[in-house]
Amino acid sequence: DLVMRSGDGTILAAAPTISTRRVQTYGRIPNNTPLIIGGLVAREEMVRQDKVPLLGDLPLIGFAFRSERKDRMKREVIIVLTPHVLPENKEARRSLPKDENLFDSFGNDLFRDSYRIRNEDVFDLTFLLENRRIVTYRDLARQAAQKNFRLAAVEPFRGFVRDSVPGESILVTRMIYEVIKRLDVARVIETSRIIYFEGQQVGGYNVKYLEQLLQDRTKDGVTDFGAQALAITYRYDRASLEEGRLGSEPIPEIKLVDCPNRKAWGQFLWELNQPTPDGQQQHTILIQNDSDIVRLSRALVLKRVAVLNGGTDEMRLKNFSVGKVLLMPELKRGQIHVLDADTAMYFFHTEHYYAATLAEIEKQLKELDRALRRPEIRLLLETD
């Protein structure tokens, strides 16, 4: 090694010896076939001396108190390359590391926690991505958008041009929910720290605690509404132009509904999350027992994960793939969590994700079909 010393012998800097070698060869081989391009031979000679302090340095007789051993090592390094010709828009999965916790990053002081997406986190959606009907309409939408780029920014074209399938954010929602469930991130959320808003006659909001709603149906820490369920419904008023809807969205409608069993719970959850007769979007949190409280806690975490990773608009299949990093929120005990329309939406989507996705796809397909029949769009498709 290279060592720099001062005048009095103090080591100022040291650097290991670096040797560089170059190997070059030419060959023509099939795809995925290993090729040995060369070998490097490294020889090392090591001298090791052991001795008894002081006695080993004595002249004449010092050799009796010391020993010396020489080791000669010869190592050969063989370089093997395996070329892989990748199709366009495909990932080099062979170069991805194993799914290990080592690649996650939690407990940082300055940077946000992060989770590396594993193969087990990603659903196999081939049946949707390669569905002939979806692929046909997607090709038509993209063909029209190529002729008129403004179409790519408006629905129903946007969902087919930008995404793999319409409604894919719902599927990503469920995948992230499974990550939250496995990591048990929601364990620190306390029911006593979950709040919602109640309207005032003079304007503004009153803060209410969810625990107060549940206290009459909670015994020994176990919540059970029996043959009923608590429905907390939010309406999406943020896009409304009607007078009086400016601050109405954060205020839920709360009521008890008859719910004899879990099968009925699932049916009611679906029905209460459908648009109103006037077409207004709404979402409902439906609580019958402790399992729904757990789902609600995970939905609150899911809302924070979505915000950290670009919002619902960025919850796309191409952003949730093996090897990508998912930013995770830092939650603390005693932290306040607010129920809102987005929380209710995630609560619903994590339960009926498959049915909700199919419903969104059918809705977008019908709207796109009507749009493609318009004369100006048909003209774009017919022109070369």
Image (cartoon, rainbow, N blue to C red):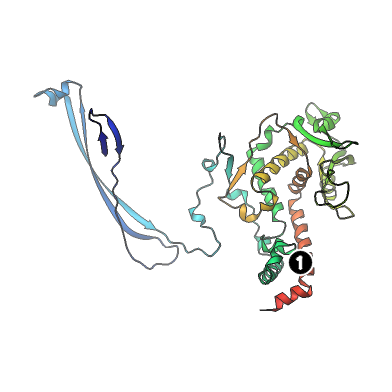
| Image-quadrant location for residue 290 | top right
Q: Is residue 156 rendered to the left or right of residue 2? A: right
10 Å crowding of disc 1: few (<14), some (14-19), many (20+): many
Q: Say which element carries label 1.
A: helix
| Image-quadrant location for residue 234 | top right
Vertical relation: 274 (above or below) 4? below
Q: Position of residue 360 (x, y in %)?
A: 76, 58
For the view shown, which residue lies furthest in the top direction?
A: 54
Question: What residue is disc 1 on?
Answer: 368
Name the foreground residue: 257 vs 6. Answer: 6
Please name the residue shown 85% across and 39% down the image: 229
Name the foreground residue: 236 vs 214. Answer: 236
Image quadrant in which the C terminus is located: bottom right
Name the foreground residue: 311 vs 84. Answer: 311
Please name the residue shown 70% across and 29% down the image: 334
Q: Position of residue 100 (x, y in %)?
A: 53, 43
Image quadrant in which the N terminus is located: top left
Name the foreground residue: 7 vs 128. Answer: 7
Q: Position of residue 95 (x, y in %)?
A: 48, 53
Q: Position of residue 297 (x, y in %)?
A: 73, 38
